[in-house]
Image (cartoon, helix red, strand yellow):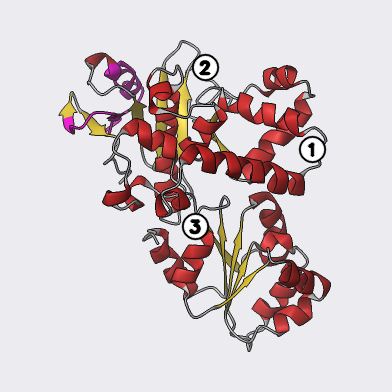
Amino acid sequence: MFDRSLKVQILAASKNYKTLALIGPRQSGKTTLAKMAFPDHIYVSLENPDSRFRAASDPKGFLAALSSDTILDEIQNVPEIFSYLQEIIDTKSDKRQFVLTGSNSFQLSNKISQSLAGRIRIFTILPLMYSEIPVALRALTLDETLLKGFYPRIYDEMLQPAEWFDSYYQTYLQKDVRQIINVSDAMQFDRFVRLCAGRVGSLADYSTIAYEVGVSQPTAVRWASVLESSFVTFRLMPHFRNFGKRIIKSPKIYFYDTGLLCQLLRIQTEEQLKLHPFRGAIFENLIISECLKQYYNKGLTPPLYFWRDQHGHEIDLVIDSGDELIPFEIKSGATFQPDWCKNLHWFSKLQNITKKHLIYSGDSEFEYQGITVCPWQGFQIG
């Protein structure tokens, strides 16, 4: 059992909404959090064949039989139920509250926009933040952390990451992917996923990936949307403010969890990771995904971008706070190098940048020429 920081936001929203939705990848802790936040709610799993059959064959009767507040787990399995939920929500005399969980954002978003828009509060729950892992359970080294990733079950049950992620990924291919699209050649899709892993932190060039896999570009783009909607990958968009410069407009590919990323890259030991050419990109993925979690755990949409012009100037991460841009440089080295700061200094000349950060794998936090240098374990977005 982990103390999830998102619980505070969920409980606050529950005072104003009759329906809440917790969406996120499988095994990220949605069900556990829902039960922990609402211990008195009835719990119904729509993964259960009997419950799913009753709900699908008679949605109205199924909901009517629920006598009090209810958690409906994996709601995407019964899309027919959403229209009937709308009727309950709009009935003022019906005071029941429903907490929905789901692991497919595409299917859920479509149904919510059709039936429950404006009536529901949606939260994204991702695997654990580093700060949510009890100190006694944390990995001893950065490389071990990258390999283990942040799925709660690995820590809760002391599982071997390589074995767990292999099973997790096979289940994902067999259940979630086939539920969203008809993949005739699972080996092709697997190759597509692994090629995306091989481009982590790089610009998304789906035409090249499609050519290497042997599918059309529209198919590759569609498969990329499947990875995003099932919370395997996310895109980091380039910031749109160009300051009079020609900028890169393609997004970058990142993964929600570094443990799964390492598994897809077939990295299974710390020794392999230490010398792997992608170690820097995996560390960058860790920091950006942690920033993503920090925003989602506050119930906010992450305003995260990167910035790159066509002359090679690049900022790994830019947070757009609305009234200012906050640039971050991310370095996997443990020994600070002044040369790491050159792009931050260059970027700060484009406009009045008051906050600049450099995150690295060392242990010390200090200021250097107006830049806050911060170790990876303790950085906060503010």
SS label for mark 2: loop
The kind of residue on which mark 2 rests is Arg
Q: Is residue 137 above or below residue 331?
A: below
The stretch in magenta equals 340-366
- Mark 3 sits on what residue? 29
Q: Which mark is residue 246?
A: 2
Compared to 190, does 172 lie above or below? Answer: below
The number of discs equals 3
Residue 275 position in % (x across, y down): 40, 17
- Give the numbered dot on residue 183: 1
Q: Residue at x 28, y 29 (%)?
A: 361
Identity of the amino acid at label 3?
Gly
Q: Residues within 10 Å of mark 3 (few under 14, many from 20)?
A: many
Query: How far apart are labels 1 and 2 at the CA level?
Result: 39 Å
Q: Is residue 349 above or below residue 180?
A: above
Residue count near mark 1 (Cα–Cα under 10 Å), binned few <14, some 14–19, many ≥20: some
Between 382 and 102, the one lying in front of the other is: 102
Q: Residue furthest top?
A: 311
| In this rendering, position of residue 363 left or right of residue 55 | left
| Earlier residue among tags 2 and 3 | 3
SS category of the residue bearing label 3: loop
Quadrant the N terminus occupies: bottom left
Q: CA distance from mark 2 to mark 3?
A: 42 Å
Q: Please name the residue shown 45% across and 57% down the image.
A: 299
